[in-house]
Image (cartoon, grey):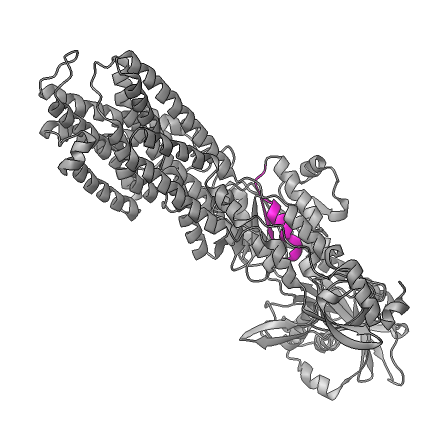
Amino acid sequence: MTFAQGARGLTSAEARARLVQDGPNVLPAARTTAPWRLLAAQFTHFFAALLWVAAGLAALAGMTQLAVAIVAVVLVNGGFAFAQEYRAGRAAARLRSMLPRRARVRRDGVPVEVDVAELVLGDAVLLTAGDRISADLKVISARLFAVDCSMLTGESVPELPEAGGSLAAGTFCVEGEAEAVVVATGARTRLAGIVDLTQHAKRPTSPLTLELNRVVRMIAGIAISLGTAFFVVAWLVGFGAKDGFLFAVGVTVALVPEGLLPTVTLSLARGAQRMAGRKALVRHLESVETLGSTTFICTDKTGTLTRNEMTVVAAWTLEGEASVSGTGYEPTGEVSCAAQARPSFVRLALAGARCSTGRAAQEDGSWVALGDPMEAALHTFARRLGVDVEADERSRPLHDRVPFDTRRRRMSVAVGGELVVKGAPEAILNLSHDASGASLVADRMAERGLRVLAIAIRSWDGTRPATPADERDLALLGLVGLEDPPRPSARAAVASCREAGIHIAVVTGDHPATAMGIAREVGIAGPDSVALEGKDLPLDEEVLGALLDRDGVVVSRVDPEDKLRIARSLQRRGHVVAMTGDGVNDGPALQEADIGIAMGRSGTDVAREAADLVLLDDDFATIVAAVAEGRSTFANIRRFLTYHLTDNVAELTPFVLWALSGGRFPLALGVLQILCLDIGTDLLPALALGAEPPRPQSLHQPPTGRHLIDRRLLFRVFAVLGAAEAAVEILAFTIALLLAGWRPGAAKPSDAVLAAASGAAFTAVVFGQMGNAFACRSVRRTPWNLGWLSNRLVAGAVVVELGALLGFLFVHPVAHALGQAPPALWPAVAAVAAAPAVLLVDALHKARIWKRSAPLPGQDG
């Protein structure tokens, strides 16, 4: 098609025919997972399958109440996870809101409004300030036309397209007017391409899921192996096949960590709640821990590290240089006294404001930019110098305007006998006289990461319209340097990330010099930092990953595909990647990254829906607090596992002694007692450990080599806590038997003697777990160092545990069903000693740790 055809527009008949041929101008439907599939997934993952098998075995063994309890755990956790995940993965659907409902076009030679779905190729679209662009267009004509493309490109400054230029669907006009012809609709637009990227970006499996699967497989293997071994032993010592099988099933089910799933879920929910209190909204619970595992943050610049506000911070005239303080668009601020006393700075500021249409204005109590943020900053600069721009506009109205041209890189206005010209220094200085030294000043400002503008004037008689040819023989008024200032908290947040062993890269669509300037100012980039542009990135992901896998990299002028490749290349090198963003263009990368972080205030719905975490205050520093919460959650899960595995040691020890003695040493605990310990007494303290607050030192180590179960944890469980608890348990049981007259090698004691001795062993395990709950709060500090009541939930859970113990011992029907009875005095004294015994050996172990190096990453202090 030709521009002439576009200018005339289509006839109604042509538009109808093309609509039938090409289809409506709508984005492709988002591929969504059916709700029933999402729900089914929560009940069929590996750990849920393990619990289903455990419930089935419990039912087979006649343990109906246990089977019901396990099923309830699976259903409650599955329902909770389904509710959290149901709203995830719908970022592509949100993109539909980026298109307006109506558009002005020329049909049959006259302007009409049509539904955007009816736009077709060749339609002539009429655009004015405030319009959202509803299809991909090619500009036919434009006057004073500016387009905000930041949601697609990341560039913070509006683009100024001219005839022949392209406009993308989803962007919007901020100034002027234009006429353009439709060149792509619906699924063929660039916006639709981002939809497709977002839909096909696969959310990686979280580190927590991988670790939980590893732990569950380990525990399942141990449980099945021990169950099989005890079946063989039971058969050898004379049990029947049926009784031996039921005995082995009971042992296997008892070792399954029924409380692991609710404890992990509630620990994540608790971390998410604390993050919300610190302005970080978690959209997927597992993201709480993933943040703690993060090793590489790819952060945007505008609105994340910066305030997303243009501000004049420096000015220069032939009389000297001035600095400007103040941020945002408030008219208050300070300019150096020398500048205020010199008319040249006032003249520079007024000229810059008059050569701009953007203005700073107060809306709902806040000062905001109306129009181009850079021009609003010039208006603010003039007001900070005390210039009454509005009064000058009334006394000297605008006569003419020559719009900005990307080739000329300048613009001009005719005002009160003067032609005021504003533009890039290299486009102004060559046309100016008396510009000595200005180039060096401009270069110095640019090295600081400032956006530099030159402003000049010449006389103008106003007898004819101004043209670009009139922009000559200029008198330079001076230079202004503008910046989008960094957030005050950004530098400290960057330093905290470095201390935590997290690499940071700036990945932005903005100008290279601006991106590098901000990166240096907040401490991300140093003298040796690598600076790249999107067009220069290697196509091979392995080469790209090797190039980017360092701290302080700055990548500018990137597009959505670049961000996706950056995330994937770093993941291939073993990094857990967090990607921040706020625009439509960030959606696919946020979905692909291990942890997508969107801006809550300045970000689009698309970015927020694609993200795992939303920063409600848009502050990069909030990420640091969220990382601390993530590491705390990981440590809390380790605390629960330590607590639970210690209990398992004490629960298995009687079976091991019974098996090694060939059944001659009585069994101290039965299967029902073990199940009662796991669900009846241990669950609340485990949940309380999941609420342990973050330690300040959690950010003092890099997040590498993190496993929920490692050699240090196993040593602490089997050689320290579990050994002490099991020793006191067997001691209390043996004392009860000996005081009742039983001797090793003698016949099996009476049921009454065995019940009282078993009650002593049961009491010892419960008291041991009471001490263990306090011991597990830290791997390095004792309860008296932490404060016994610094986690009141643990103290409360221990009190409830004591009450449950009394019920299990002294409520006769319950005690009888469990096969136990209240112990005698001295066995009871020995059982109660389990708590101080566990705390004592734990304190000795921690004293040894203090003599060695700092804790492993992910462990608390």
Task: Count all numbered tags in the image, as a single digit.
Answer: 0
Horizontal side of residue 473 vs 480, given as left or right: right
User: Where residue 369 sits in the image (x, y, percent)?
Assistant: 64, 71
Is 588 part of what is drawn in magenta?
yes
Rendered-image quadrant of the N terminus:
bottom right
Is 312 part of what is drawn in magenta?
no
User: Where residue 496 sits in the image (x, y, percent)?
Assistant: 51, 47
Q: Nearer the viewer, residue 600 or 262?
A: 262
**Residue 324: quarter of image:** bottom right
User: Where residue 595 sits in the image (x, y, percent)?
Assistant: 55, 46
User: Where residue 696 sits in the image (x, y, percent)?
Assistant: 42, 45
Q: Nearer the viewer, residue 846 or 594?
A: 594
Rendered-image quadrant of the C terminus:
top left
Residue 625 can be seen in this image: no
Q: Nearer the viewer, residue 11 or 3?
A: 11
Residue 624 higher or lower than 240, as above or below: below
Instruction: Determine the residue positioned at 58% across, 53% down.
Output: 90
Instruction: Determine the residue positioned at 78% across, 66% down.
Output: 160
Q: Residue reaching furthest bottom?
A: 395
Q: Nearer the viewer, residue 846 or 210?
A: 210
**Residue 306: quarter of image:** bottom right
Residue 322 higher or lower than 833, as above or below: below
Magenta part of the chain:
575-593
Residue 843 can be seen in this image: yes
Horizontal side of residue 81 vs 717, given as left or right: right
Residue 721 higher or lower than 14, as above or below: above
Instruction: Determine the residue positioned at 63% across, 39% down.
Output: 570
